[in-house]
Amino acid sequence: MNCPLFSSKATEYLVDNIPRKLRLPRAGKFDSLLLAATTNSAPIKPPHQRRSRIIAEMSLKNGTAASNDSAFRFPIPPEQSDDMGKPLVPDFSDDEKVKQYIHDRRVIGYDPLLAPSFLLHKLPTSSESLRTTALARYRASQIIQGQSSDLLVIVGPCSIHSPAQALHYARLLKTQVDAGRFPRLLILMRTYFEKPRTTIGWKGLINDPNIDGSFAINDGLQTARKLLHDITSMGIPVASELLDTISPQYISDLLSWGAIGARTTESQLHRELASGVSFPIGFKNGTDGSVSTAIDAMSSSSHPHAFMGVTTTGLASIVKTRGNDDVHIILRGGSSGPNFSSEHIQDAFEKIQKSGTRTFPSIMVDCSHGNSQKNHLNQPKVITSLCKTLTSTSGPESSLPPHARHITGVMIESNIREGKQSIPSSYSATRDSLVNGAKIISNLDELETDKDDGEVKLKYGVSITDACVDWDMTMTMLDELNEAVERRHQLLHPST
Ligand SMILES: O=C[C@H](O)[C@H](O)COP(=O)(O)O
Ligand SMILES: C=C(OP(=O)(O)O)C(=O)O
């Protein structure tokens, strides 16, 4: 059969010819393409896996309801039970029945995931994007290593749910950066695609790009990569959280900085991952406010590691890393309260010094999360306090205290419009022109009328995860920061 796999003709051919029962429920375009491509060559699954797939498909046909508290909007098959409907117990009279107790009792499906190399080939980087990324990595590294007194600023939405709106935000940022408004700030756009959740909730654009429980992860990866490419090609470098340990293979060549979140800073897997990435990494303090967790992470990641991972072709491999010296802490507050004050920063600085880490003690302050108590209106207050710390001199020589020199970064959760909104229960981005970009927004004042045309929509430019400050407030905060960093520069280098 002569059938080039990824032409649109081939897609039509394959999609028309795969047995209906093998198609994914509510799959995105990319999913059906890949499913089709891999179905032809997929190895025959062992009987227990075929059985669970068949059970899943039968339940889909029969419409078994998903449990109410699950994000899955497609049916979840019931657990295996005996003939009386009781939970299965191992039946030692028959090996096949024993196996039912061993394999896939809780896995309800394995869908094909495209290989990173496929996406890297399909969406290569532009030379503009490469330059933007490399330059920002270099400048961020200089700041983190204490070789530049500029400030690294990670600013942007809590999470990306609409590529069109993210591009809108990037264009707003570009206009100000290109105009030279913040000469002392190295600004990277927060472009977060993966959200760690305290319990459950929407886990970001890669995991569920349609925001409807269809989990079209292949589409999510493609959308994320395309967006990173478009933003960096405009000349705006990007920053993201590394939450999944496989997904960086799909997008990390486009990132200039990464975060390991408060919920994963203590994870060995994430420390190993951080030790091998080609860009600087910030570790959040723990959700309980623990700074030592992040300091341990900095130390661990600055050393070489060997661990299990995947290559860009998707092959399992033993990854060996050199260790990452471009690591720093991010003070984000926690259940024990905020930690952005001058005293907290001094304490963190002294703890990093005492820990004997071989890297420059480098501190970023997150204005949001535990430091804002999740109220976006507190973020400007964190900036004002930080600016004071950056510029307050002390002692007979009126000099800057050492910890003020070691503040190297700031994080702000900001969006086009302020606050946050919840996701309506019957929402799907596939039906929302404001999210999928079919409608280009030019005048934000007109938006109020957009939401009431009979469809379930999200408000344009408003976060669907944590509350953000709006664009005007963002500019005010960045102006204040730029001025304080300039003042600090003069204090550190009076002759320039
Ligand atoms: O940054 C976003 C959130 O703080 C993080 O994902 C946790 O969110 P949750 O507590 O609402 O699950
Ligand atoms: C989830 C985030 O932060 P934290 O890990 O500090 O909760 C975030 O920055 O999006």
Image: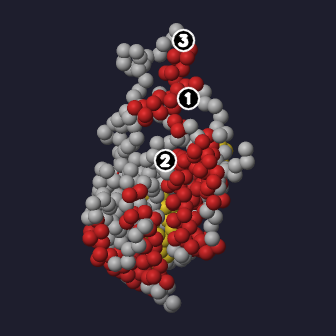
User: Looking at the image, can residue 69 be seen?
Assistant: yes
User: Element type at marker 3?
Assistant: loop
Q: Residue 370 appears in which quarter of the rendering?
A: bottom left
Question: Counting residues from the N terminus, which is met first, the one under dot 2 or under dot 3?
Answer: 2
Q: Residue at x 45, y 65 (%)?
A: 163
Q: Residue at x 35, y 58 (%)?
A: 465
Residue type (three-letter) at the residue carrying disc 1: Arg
Q: Nearer the viewer, residue 397 or 144?
A: 144
User: Element type at marker 1?
Assistant: helix
Instruction: Confirm or reject: label 3 Cβ below 8 Å from ligand 1.
Output: no
Vertical relation: 97 (above or below) 414: above
Q: Residues within 10 Å of mark 2 (few under 14, many from 20)?
A: some
Q: Would you say the residues marked 3 and 1 are in contact, meaning their CB atoms lie under 8 Å apart?
A: no
Q: Specify the label residue 352 is tagged with.
A: none
Vertical relation: 156 (above or below) 42: below
User: Element type at marker 2?
Assistant: loop
Query: x and y percent of residue 166 in the render?
Result: 44, 68
Query: x and y percent of residue 24 in the render?
Result: 50, 42
Q: CA distance from mark 2 to mark 3?
A: 37 Å
For mark 3, what is the residue? 94
Query: x and y percent of residue 131 in the render?
Result: 62, 74
Q: Would you say the residues marked 2 and 3 are in contact, meaning their CB atoms lie under 8 Å apart?
A: no
For mark 2, what is the residue? 27
Q: Residue at x 35, y 41 (%)?
A: 70
Q: Nearer the viewer, residue 234 or 153?
A: 234
Query: x and y percent of residue 140 in the render?
Result: 54, 71
Q: Is residue 379 left or right of residue 109?
A: left
Q: Is residue 424 left or right of residue 300?
A: left
Residue type (three-letter) at the residue carrying disc 2: Ala
